[in-house]
Image (spheres, rainbow, N blue to C red):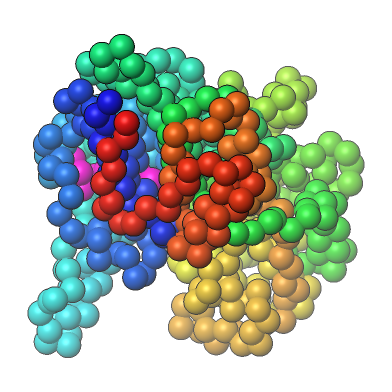
Amino acid sequence: MQIKLQFLGAVQNVTGSRHFLEANGTRILVDCGLYQERQFRARNWDPFPVDPKKINAVLLTHAHLDHCGLLPKLVKEGFSGKIYCTPATAEIAKIILLDAAKIQEEDAEHKRKRHERQGRKGPYPEVPLYTTEDAEACFPLFEHVEYRESVNLGDGMETTFYDAGHVLGSSIIRVKVRQDSQERIILFSGDIGRPDRPIVCDPTVFDYADYVLIESTYGNRIHEEVADVEKTMGDVINAAIKAGGNIIVPSFALERSQEVLYYINELRLKNKIPEFKIFLDSPMASKITKVFKHHPELFDKEMTDYIKRHKSPFDLPGLQMAGTADESKAINSIKDSIMVIAGSGMCTGGRVKHHLVNNISNPKNTIMFVGYQAVGTLGRSIVDGIKEVRILGEKRKVEAKIIRIHGFSAHADRDELLDWLKEMEAPPRGVFVVHGETESARSFGNYVIKQTGWNVTVPEYQDEIVLD
Ligand SMILES: [Zn+2]
Protein backbone atom coordinates (compact mmCIF):
# COMPACT_ATOMS: atom_id res chain seq x y z
CA MET A 1 0.00 0.00 0.00
CA GLN A 2 1.13 3.54 -0.77
CA ILE A 3 -0.98 6.08 1.06
CA LYS A 4 0.52 9.41 1.95
CA LEU A 5 -0.75 11.25 5.01
CA GLN A 6 0.47 14.69 5.95
CA PHE A 7 -0.44 16.69 9.04
CA LEU A 8 -0.94 20.30 8.01
CA GLY A 9 -2.67 21.73 11.03
CA ALA A 10 -4.10 21.12 14.51
CA VAL A 11 -0.97 19.15 15.39
CA GLN A 12 0.02 19.80 18.98
CA ASN A 13 -2.39 22.70 18.96
CA VAL A 14 -6.16 22.95 18.77
CA THR A 15 -7.02 25.10 15.76
CA GLY A 16 -6.19 25.10 12.04
CA SER A 17 -7.31 21.51 11.31
CA ARG A 18 -5.93 20.28 7.96
CA HIS A 19 -4.97 16.76 7.02
CA PHE A 20 -3.74 15.81 3.57
CA LEU A 21 -4.20 12.34 2.12
CA GLU A 22 -2.93 11.08 -1.21
CA ALA A 23 -3.54 7.66 -2.73
CA ASN A 24 -3.91 6.30 -6.26
CA GLY A 25 -3.27 9.77 -7.65
CA THR A 26 -6.17 11.35 -5.75
CA ARG A 27 -5.33 14.14 -3.34
CA ILE A 28 -7.74 15.17 -0.64
CA LEU A 29 -7.75 17.56 2.28
CA VAL A 30 -9.77 16.76 5.39
CA ASP A 31 -10.80 20.15 6.83
CA CYS A 32 -9.26 23.49 5.99
CA GLY A 33 -9.43 25.40 9.23
CA LEU A 34 -8.27 28.77 10.43
CA TYR A 35 -5.57 29.05 13.08
CA GLN A 36 -7.03 31.01 15.98
CA GLU A 37 -4.36 30.73 18.68
CA ARG A 38 -2.35 33.93 18.68
CA GLN A 39 1.03 32.20 18.37
CA PHE A 40 -0.02 30.27 15.25
CA ARG A 41 -2.06 32.89 13.41
CA ALA A 42 0.82 33.80 11.10
CA ARG A 43 0.41 30.36 9.50
CA ASN A 44 -2.93 31.52 8.05
CA TRP A 45 -0.88 33.76 5.75
CA ASP A 46 1.65 31.13 4.68
CA PRO A 47 1.30 29.64 1.21
CA PHE A 48 -0.44 26.25 1.35
CA PRO A 49 2.08 23.44 1.84
CA VAL A 50 0.27 21.62 -0.98
CA ASP A 51 -0.63 23.36 -4.24
CA PRO A 52 -4.39 24.09 -3.94
CA LYS A 53 -4.79 23.57 -7.70
CA LYS A 54 -3.64 19.98 -7.31
CA ILE A 55 -6.06 19.05 -4.53
CA ASN A 56 -9.03 17.09 -5.88
CA ALA A 57 -11.49 17.45 -3.02
CA VAL A 58 -11.99 18.73 0.51
CA LEU A 59 -13.89 16.70 3.09
CA LEU A 60 -15.27 18.97 5.79
CA THR A 61 -16.02 17.50 9.23
CA HIS A 62 -18.01 20.46 10.57
CA ALA A 63 -18.63 24.17 10.39
CA HIS A 64 -16.48 25.52 13.24
CA LEU A 65 -14.05 28.14 12.01
CA ASP A 66 -11.00 26.14 13.07
CA HIS A 67 -12.14 23.44 10.62
CA CYS A 68 -13.56 25.44 7.69
CA GLY A 69 -12.16 28.96 8.11
CA LEU A 70 -9.36 28.77 5.55
CA LEU A 71 -11.53 27.47 2.68
CA PRO A 72 -11.88 30.95 1.08
CA LYS A 73 -8.08 31.24 0.91
CA LEU A 74 -7.78 27.74 -0.57
CA VAL A 75 -10.30 28.63 -3.28
CA LYS A 76 -8.70 32.02 -3.89
CA GLU A 77 -5.40 30.24 -4.47
CA GLY A 78 -6.78 27.90 -7.08
CA PHE A 79 -8.68 25.01 -5.50
CA SER A 80 -11.66 24.20 -7.71
CA GLY A 81 -12.74 20.72 -6.57
CA LYS A 82 -15.75 19.80 -4.48
CA ILE A 83 -16.10 20.51 -0.76
CA TYR A 84 -18.01 17.52 0.60
CA CYS A 85 -20.00 17.95 3.80
CA THR A 86 -23.44 17.36 5.28
CA PRO A 87 -26.18 19.80 4.20
CA ALA A 88 -26.36 21.30 7.72
CA THR A 89 -22.58 21.82 7.78
CA ALA A 90 -22.75 23.57 4.39
CA GLU A 91 -25.52 25.91 5.57
CA ILE A 92 -23.77 26.77 8.83
CA ALA A 93 -20.32 27.07 7.20
CA LYS A 94 -21.68 29.67 4.78
CA ILE A 95 -22.97 31.81 7.68
CA ILE A 96 -19.71 31.42 9.59
CA LEU A 97 -17.46 32.14 6.60
CA LEU A 98 -19.35 35.30 5.68
CA ASP A 99 -19.03 36.49 9.25
CA ALA A 100 -15.31 35.63 9.30
CA ALA A 101 -14.75 37.48 6.02
CA LYS A 102 -16.46 40.57 7.42
CA ILE A 103 -14.25 40.46 10.51
CA GLN A 104 -11.12 40.04 8.32
CA GLU A 105 -12.17 43.04 6.25
CA GLU A 106 -12.86 45.18 9.33
CA ASP A 107 -9.60 44.15 11.01
CA ALA A 108 -7.59 45.00 7.90
CA GLU A 109 -9.28 48.38 7.67
CA HIS A 110 -8.54 49.11 11.35
CA LYS A 111 -4.91 48.17 10.88
CA ARG A 112 -4.65 50.29 7.77
CA LYS A 113 -6.05 53.33 9.59
CA ARG A 114 -3.87 52.76 12.63
CA HIS A 115 -0.73 52.46 10.54
CA GLU A 116 -1.68 55.58 8.63
CA ARG A 117 -2.06 57.50 11.89
CA GLN A 118 1.26 56.21 13.15
CA GLY A 119 2.96 56.81 9.82
CA ARG A 120 3.87 53.12 9.56
CA LYS A 121 3.85 50.73 6.68
CA GLY A 122 3.63 46.99 7.27
CA PRO A 123 4.97 44.47 8.13
CA TYR A 124 1.49 43.68 9.43
CA PRO A 125 -0.95 42.84 6.70
CA GLU A 126 -3.30 45.63 5.85
CA VAL A 127 -5.23 43.49 3.42
CA PRO A 128 -7.85 41.04 4.65
CA LEU A 129 -6.90 37.36 4.71
CA TYR A 130 -9.97 36.98 2.54
CA THR A 131 -12.97 39.07 1.59
CA THR A 132 -16.73 38.48 1.43
CA GLU A 133 -16.36 37.77 -2.31
CA ASP A 134 -13.68 35.18 -1.57
CA ALA A 135 -16.00 33.49 0.94
CA GLU A 136 -18.88 33.52 -1.53
CA ALA A 137 -16.65 31.93 -4.18
CA CYS A 138 -16.54 28.75 -2.05
CA PHE A 139 -20.28 28.29 -1.93
CA PRO A 140 -20.81 26.72 -5.39
CA LEU A 141 -18.21 24.09 -4.50
CA PHE A 142 -20.13 22.72 -1.51
CA GLU A 143 -21.44 19.24 -2.29
CA HIS A 144 -23.95 17.70 0.09
CA VAL A 145 -23.32 14.25 1.55
CA GLU A 146 -25.84 12.54 3.79
CA TYR A 147 -24.67 10.48 6.75
CA ARG A 148 -23.75 6.91 5.78
CA GLU A 149 -23.90 7.65 2.06
CA SER A 150 -20.72 6.55 0.26
CA VAL A 151 -19.10 8.92 -2.20
CA ASN A 152 -16.51 7.93 -4.77
CA LEU A 153 -13.53 10.30 -4.67
CA GLY A 154 -11.46 8.77 -7.44
CA ASP A 155 -9.70 5.60 -8.39
CA GLY A 156 -10.08 3.21 -5.44
CA MET A 157 -10.94 5.90 -2.92
CA GLU A 158 -14.31 6.44 -1.29
CA THR A 159 -15.62 8.28 1.72
CA THR A 160 -18.54 8.04 4.13
CA PHE A 161 -19.65 10.57 6.75
CA TYR A 162 -21.03 9.59 10.19
CA ASP A 163 -22.61 11.68 12.94
CA ALA A 164 -19.94 12.97 15.36
CA GLY A 165 -22.43 14.36 17.92
CA HIS A 166 -20.33 17.51 18.33
CA VAL A 167 -22.42 20.24 16.68
CA LEU A 168 -25.32 20.06 14.23
CA GLY A 169 -24.20 18.32 11.03
CA SER A 170 -20.77 17.38 12.42
CA SER A 171 -19.10 14.30 11.03
CA ILE A 172 -16.54 11.63 11.62
CA ILE A 173 -15.13 10.88 8.18
CA ARG A 174 -14.15 7.42 7.00
CA VAL A 175 -11.97 7.08 3.91
CA LYS A 176 -11.52 3.70 2.25
CA VAL A 177 -8.54 3.20 -0.06
CA ARG A 178 -8.19 0.18 -2.36
CA GLN A 179 -4.89 -0.75 -3.98
CA ASP A 180 -4.46 -4.00 -5.90
CA SER A 181 -6.50 -6.40 -3.81
CA GLN A 182 -5.88 -4.66 -0.51
CA GLU A 183 -7.97 -2.18 1.38
CA ARG A 184 -7.29 0.32 4.17
CA ILE A 185 -9.71 2.31 6.26
CA ILE A 186 -8.64 5.69 7.62
CA LEU A 187 -10.88 7.37 10.16
CA PHE A 188 -10.79 11.11 10.77
CA SER A 189 -12.53 11.76 14.08
CA GLY A 190 -13.06 15.49 13.54
CA ASP A 191 -14.31 16.81 16.88
CA ILE A 192 -16.03 14.12 18.91
CA GLY A 193 -19.07 15.02 20.98
CA ARG A 194 -20.24 13.48 24.22
CA PRO A 195 -22.96 10.97 24.93
CA ASP A 196 -26.32 12.37 26.12
CA ARG A 197 -25.87 15.92 24.95
CA PRO A 198 -29.01 17.95 24.25
CA ILE A 199 -30.28 18.25 20.66
CA VAL A 200 -27.57 16.30 18.79
CA CYS A 201 -27.20 12.52 18.64
CA ASP A 202 -24.44 10.56 20.37
CA PRO A 203 -21.17 10.18 18.47
CA THR A 204 -21.04 7.20 16.08
CA VAL A 205 -18.69 4.43 17.18
CA PHE A 206 -16.67 2.15 14.90
CA ASP A 207 -15.57 -1.43 15.32
CA TYR A 208 -12.81 -1.29 12.74
CA ALA A 209 -10.25 1.03 11.20
CA ASP A 210 -6.67 0.63 10.03
CA TYR A 211 -5.67 4.15 10.94
CA VAL A 212 -7.36 6.67 13.22
CA LEU A 213 -6.75 10.40 13.57
CA ILE A 214 -8.29 11.33 16.89
CA GLU A 215 -8.82 14.75 18.44
CA SER A 216 -7.50 15.42 21.96
CA THR A 217 -8.86 18.83 22.97
CA TYR A 218 -9.58 17.42 26.44
CA GLY A 219 -7.13 14.54 26.17
CA ASN A 220 -5.69 15.22 29.60
CA ARG A 221 -8.87 16.16 31.42
CA ILE A 222 -12.01 14.65 32.81
CA HIS A 223 -15.05 16.90 32.64
CA GLU A 224 -16.35 17.88 36.02
CA GLU A 225 -19.35 15.83 36.99
CA VAL A 226 -22.24 17.92 35.77
CA ALA A 227 -24.22 18.83 38.85
CA ASP A 228 -27.40 19.38 36.91
CA VAL A 229 -27.38 22.02 34.22
CA GLU A 230 -31.13 22.20 34.07
CA LYS A 231 -31.66 22.64 37.80
CA THR A 232 -28.83 25.17 38.16
CA MET A 233 -30.18 27.19 35.28
CA GLY A 234 -33.70 27.08 36.74
CA ASP A 235 -32.43 28.36 40.10
CA VAL A 236 -30.48 31.18 38.43
CA ILE A 237 -33.48 32.26 36.37
CA ASN A 238 -35.92 32.18 39.28
CA ALA A 239 -33.57 34.14 41.53
CA ALA A 240 -33.01 36.79 38.86
CA ILE A 241 -36.72 37.19 38.16
CA LYS A 242 -37.48 37.40 41.89
CA ALA A 243 -34.86 40.13 42.24
CA GLY A 244 -36.36 41.95 39.27
CA GLY A 245 -33.10 41.75 37.35
CA ASN A 246 -31.93 40.71 33.88
CA ILE A 247 -29.90 37.69 32.87
CA ILE A 248 -27.14 38.24 30.32
CA VAL A 249 -25.77 35.09 28.70
CA PRO A 250 -22.57 35.47 26.67
CA SER A 251 -22.81 32.59 24.24
CA PHE A 252 -21.31 31.01 21.13
CA ALA A 253 -23.59 31.20 18.10
CA LEU A 254 -23.35 27.55 17.12
CA GLU A 255 -24.81 24.91 19.43
CA ARG A 256 -24.39 26.69 22.78
CA SER A 257 -27.11 29.29 22.15
CA GLN A 258 -29.47 26.57 20.95
CA GLU A 259 -28.64 24.41 23.99
CA VAL A 260 -29.52 27.26 26.35
CA LEU A 261 -32.90 27.54 24.60
CA TYR A 262 -33.29 23.78 24.91
CA TYR A 263 -32.89 23.87 28.69
CA ILE A 264 -35.24 26.84 29.05
CA ASN A 265 -37.84 24.95 27.02
CA GLU A 266 -37.44 21.93 29.27
CA LEU A 267 -37.80 24.06 32.42
CA ARG A 268 -40.90 25.67 30.94
CA LEU A 269 -42.48 22.33 30.07
CA LYS A 270 -41.95 21.22 33.65
CA ASN A 271 -43.36 24.52 34.97
CA LYS A 272 -40.13 25.18 36.86
CA ILE A 273 -39.78 28.75 35.59
CA PRO A 274 -42.29 31.45 34.63
CA GLU A 275 -42.64 32.85 31.15
CA PHE A 276 -40.33 35.78 30.45
CA LYS A 277 -38.91 37.53 27.42
CA ILE A 278 -35.78 36.02 25.88
CA PHE A 279 -33.74 37.82 23.25
CA LEU A 280 -31.36 35.96 21.02
CA ASP A 281 -29.40 39.09 20.19
CA SER A 282 -26.93 37.75 17.69
CA PRO A 283 -27.66 37.83 13.98
CA MET A 284 -25.33 34.88 13.50
CA ALA A 285 -26.93 32.78 16.26
CA SER A 286 -30.37 33.64 14.86
CA LYS A 287 -29.38 32.49 11.37
CA ILE A 288 -27.84 29.31 12.74
CA THR A 289 -30.94 28.61 14.83
CA LYS A 290 -32.92 28.72 11.58
CA VAL A 291 -30.61 26.01 10.20
CA PHE A 292 -31.45 23.89 13.25
CA LYS A 293 -35.15 24.38 12.43
CA HIS A 294 -34.52 23.13 8.87
CA HIS A 295 -32.88 19.94 10.07
CA PRO A 296 -35.09 18.13 12.58
CA GLU A 297 -33.84 14.84 11.08
CA LEU A 298 -30.53 15.44 12.88
CA PHE A 299 -32.03 15.70 16.37
CA ASP A 300 -31.76 12.99 19.00
CA LYS A 301 -34.78 11.15 20.36
CA GLU A 302 -35.63 13.53 23.24
CA MET A 303 -35.53 16.54 20.96
CA THR A 304 -37.59 14.74 18.32
CA ASP A 305 -40.21 13.99 20.98
CA TYR A 306 -40.37 17.68 21.94
CA ILE A 307 -40.89 18.67 18.34
CA LYS A 308 -43.64 16.07 17.94
CA ARG A 309 -45.44 17.64 20.87
CA HIS A 310 -45.05 21.01 19.11
CA LYS A 311 -42.72 22.27 21.80
CA SER A 312 -39.65 23.25 19.88
CA PRO A 313 -37.13 25.21 21.94
CA PHE A 314 -36.67 27.39 18.86
CA ASP A 315 -40.30 28.53 18.97
CA LEU A 316 -40.38 29.29 22.70
CA PRO A 317 -43.13 31.70 23.71
CA GLY A 318 -41.45 35.02 24.50
CA LEU A 319 -38.39 34.29 22.34
CA GLN A 320 -37.37 37.11 20.03
CA MET A 321 -34.52 37.13 17.59
CA ALA A 322 -33.08 40.63 17.41
CA GLY A 323 -31.81 41.46 13.95
CA THR A 324 -30.84 45.07 13.41
CA ALA A 325 -28.68 47.20 15.68
CA ASP A 326 -31.76 49.29 16.51
CA GLU A 327 -33.67 46.20 17.62
CA SER A 328 -30.68 45.31 19.79
CA LYS A 329 -30.57 48.80 21.36
CA ALA A 330 -34.33 48.71 22.02
CA ILE A 331 -33.77 45.78 24.39
CA ASN A 332 -32.19 48.20 26.91
CA SER A 333 -35.42 50.08 27.49
CA ILE A 334 -37.45 47.02 28.51
CA LYS A 335 -38.46 47.26 32.17
CA ASP A 336 -39.35 43.58 32.92
CA SER A 337 -36.82 40.90 33.78
CA ILE A 338 -35.45 39.56 30.54
CA MET A 339 -32.77 37.19 29.32
CA VAL A 340 -30.38 38.26 26.59
CA ILE A 341 -28.31 35.62 24.84
CA ALA A 342 -25.62 37.34 22.79
CA GLY A 343 -22.17 36.81 21.34
CA SER A 344 -19.35 36.61 21.58
CA GLY A 345 -19.10 33.70 23.96
CA MET A 346 -15.98 35.01 25.70
CA CYS A 347 -17.10 38.68 25.58
CA THR A 348 -14.26 39.58 23.20
CA GLY A 349 -16.59 41.37 20.78
CA GLY A 350 -20.15 41.47 19.51
CA ARG A 351 -23.36 42.75 21.05
CA VAL A 352 -22.85 41.13 24.44
CA LYS A 353 -20.43 43.96 25.27
CA HIS A 354 -23.23 46.54 25.04
CA HIS A 355 -25.43 44.43 27.28
CA LEU A 356 -22.62 44.06 29.80
CA VAL A 357 -22.09 47.85 29.88
CA ASN A 358 -25.79 48.29 30.62
CA ASN A 359 -26.21 45.47 33.13
CA ILE A 360 -22.99 44.55 34.90
CA SER A 361 -23.16 47.25 37.60
CA ASN A 362 -26.65 46.44 38.86
CA PRO A 363 -26.65 43.88 41.70
CA LYS A 364 -30.14 42.71 40.67
CA ASN A 365 -28.75 41.39 37.37
CA THR A 366 -26.99 38.13 36.61
CA ILE A 367 -24.29 37.38 34.09
CA MET A 368 -24.56 33.68 33.31
CA PHE A 369 -21.54 32.05 31.64
CA VAL A 370 -22.20 28.79 29.82
CA GLY A 371 -18.94 28.23 27.99
CA TYR A 372 -15.20 28.02 28.25
CA GLN A 373 -13.47 31.35 28.96
CA ALA A 374 -9.92 31.46 27.61
CA VAL A 375 -7.16 33.20 29.52
CA GLY A 376 -6.84 36.85 28.49
CA THR A 377 -10.49 37.36 27.51
CA LEU A 378 -12.93 39.77 29.15
CA GLY A 379 -15.16 36.81 30.00
CA ARG A 380 -12.32 35.15 31.90
CA SER A 381 -11.60 38.32 33.91
CA ILE A 382 -15.25 38.57 34.93
CA VAL A 383 -15.46 34.88 35.85
CA ASP A 384 -12.23 35.24 37.86
CA GLY A 385 -13.86 37.95 39.96
CA ILE A 386 -12.47 41.22 38.65
CA LYS A 387 -14.08 44.15 40.52
CA GLU A 388 -14.04 46.73 37.78
CA VAL A 389 -13.97 46.32 34.00
CA ARG A 390 -13.47 48.54 31.02
CA ILE A 391 -15.92 47.67 28.26
CA LEU A 392 -16.22 49.67 25.02
CA GLY A 393 -14.13 52.40 26.63
CA GLU A 394 -16.44 52.68 29.67
CA LYS A 395 -15.46 51.82 33.21
CA ARG A 396 -17.98 49.69 35.07
CA LYS A 397 -18.04 48.22 38.57
CA VAL A 398 -18.91 44.53 38.58
CA GLU A 399 -21.92 44.37 40.89
CA ALA A 400 -24.09 41.86 39.06
CA LYS A 401 -24.16 38.22 40.15
CA ILE A 402 -21.60 36.21 38.19
CA ILE A 403 -22.63 32.62 37.61
CA ARG A 404 -20.78 29.96 35.71
CA ILE A 405 -22.67 26.85 34.67
CA HIS A 406 -20.49 23.84 33.97
CA GLY A 407 -21.42 20.85 31.89
CA PHE A 408 -21.78 22.37 28.45
CA SER A 409 -18.68 20.96 26.73
CA ALA A 410 -19.17 19.76 23.16
CA HIS A 411 -15.94 17.72 23.27
CA ALA A 412 -15.44 14.27 24.70
CA ASP A 413 -13.02 14.16 27.64
CA ARG A 414 -10.06 11.78 28.10
CA ASP A 415 -12.11 8.78 29.19
CA GLU A 416 -14.85 9.38 26.65
CA LEU A 417 -12.23 9.57 23.88
CA LEU A 418 -10.68 6.32 25.09
CA ASP A 419 -14.13 4.67 25.28
CA TRP A 420 -14.73 5.76 21.70
CA LEU A 421 -11.42 4.22 20.55
CA LYS A 422 -12.00 1.03 22.52
CA GLU A 423 -15.08 0.23 20.47
CA MET A 424 -12.57 -1.02 17.89
CA GLU A 425 -12.55 -4.79 17.94
CA ALA A 426 -8.99 -5.05 16.67
CA PRO A 427 -6.08 -2.68 17.30
CA PRO A 428 -5.70 -0.20 14.44
CA ARG A 429 -2.33 -0.24 12.64
CA GLY A 430 -1.83 3.30 13.84
CA VAL A 431 -3.50 5.98 15.94
CA PHE A 432 -2.49 9.61 15.42
CA VAL A 433 -3.37 12.08 18.15
CA VAL A 434 -4.20 15.53 16.77
CA HIS A 435 -6.28 18.62 17.70
CA GLY A 436 -4.94 19.09 21.21
CA GLU A 437 -2.22 21.19 22.78
CA THR A 438 1.13 19.38 23.07
CA GLU A 439 0.61 18.51 26.72
CA SER A 440 -2.91 17.28 26.12
CA ALA A 441 -2.08 15.29 22.95
CA ARG A 442 1.00 13.61 24.49
CA SER A 443 -0.74 12.83 27.73
CA PHE A 444 -3.66 11.27 25.85
CA GLY A 445 -1.30 9.35 23.55
CA ASN A 446 0.51 7.85 26.54
CA TYR A 447 -2.77 7.06 28.23
CA VAL A 448 -4.01 5.13 25.18
CA ILE A 449 -0.72 3.21 24.96
CA LYS A 450 -0.95 2.33 28.65
CA GLN A 451 -4.57 1.24 28.42
CA THR A 452 -4.42 -0.64 25.11
CA GLY A 453 -0.82 -1.23 24.05
CA TRP A 454 -1.70 0.16 20.61
CA ASN A 455 0.64 1.94 18.23
CA VAL A 456 0.04 5.63 18.97
CA THR A 457 1.85 8.67 17.54
CA VAL A 458 1.64 12.38 18.29
CA PRO A 459 2.71 13.93 14.98
CA GLU A 460 4.56 17.21 14.49
CA TYR A 461 3.44 20.01 12.18
CA GLN A 462 3.87 19.01 8.51
CA ASP A 463 4.99 15.47 9.36
CA GLU A 464 4.56 13.17 6.40
CA ILE A 465 3.82 9.49 6.83
CA VAL A 466 3.40 6.63 4.39
CA LEU A 467 0.67 4.31 5.53
CA ASP A 468 1.15 0.68 4.60
ZN1 LIG B 1 -15.59 21.87 16.64
Q: Quadrant of the N terminus?
A: top left
Give the x, y percent position of residue 302: 75, 28
Q: Nearer the viewer, residue 289 or 423?
A: 423
- Foreground: 419 or 139? 419
Is the stretch drawn in magenta largely helix, strand or loop?
A: helix
Q: Quadrant of residue 133?
A: top left
Residue at x 72%, y 76% (from the top left corner): 400
The answer to whether residue 14 is visible is yes
Q: Is residue 68 magenta?
A: yes
Stretch in magenta:
67-76
Name above or below for residue 391 compared with residue 201: below
Residue 460 occupies which quadrant of the picture? bottom left
At x 43%, y 45%, the residue is 432
Horizontally, residue 150 falls left or right of residue 256, namely: left
Relative to 188, residue 446 above or below: below
Residue 456 place in picture, x, y as percent: 47, 46
Q: Position of residue 177 (x, y in %)?
A: 32, 21
Residue 416: % across, % down: 66, 44
For residue 385, above or below residue 97: below
Q: Residue at x 31, y 11 (%)?
A: 181
Horizontal side, residue 238 vs residue 384: left or right? right
Residue furthest out toward the top: 181
Whether residue 329 is visible to the viewer of this picture, yes or no, is no
The residue located at (22%, 74%) in the rendering is: 111
Q: Quick one: 185 or 161, which is closer to the camera?
A: 185
51, above or below 337, in the image: above
Task: Using residue 343 as the reference point, say whether residue 132 is left or right of it.
Answer: left
Q: For residue 220, what is the image quadrant? A: bottom right
Q: Among all residues in the image, which is located at the extreme front?
A: 453
Q: Is residue 249 magenta?
A: no
Quadrant location of the C terminus?
Answer: top left
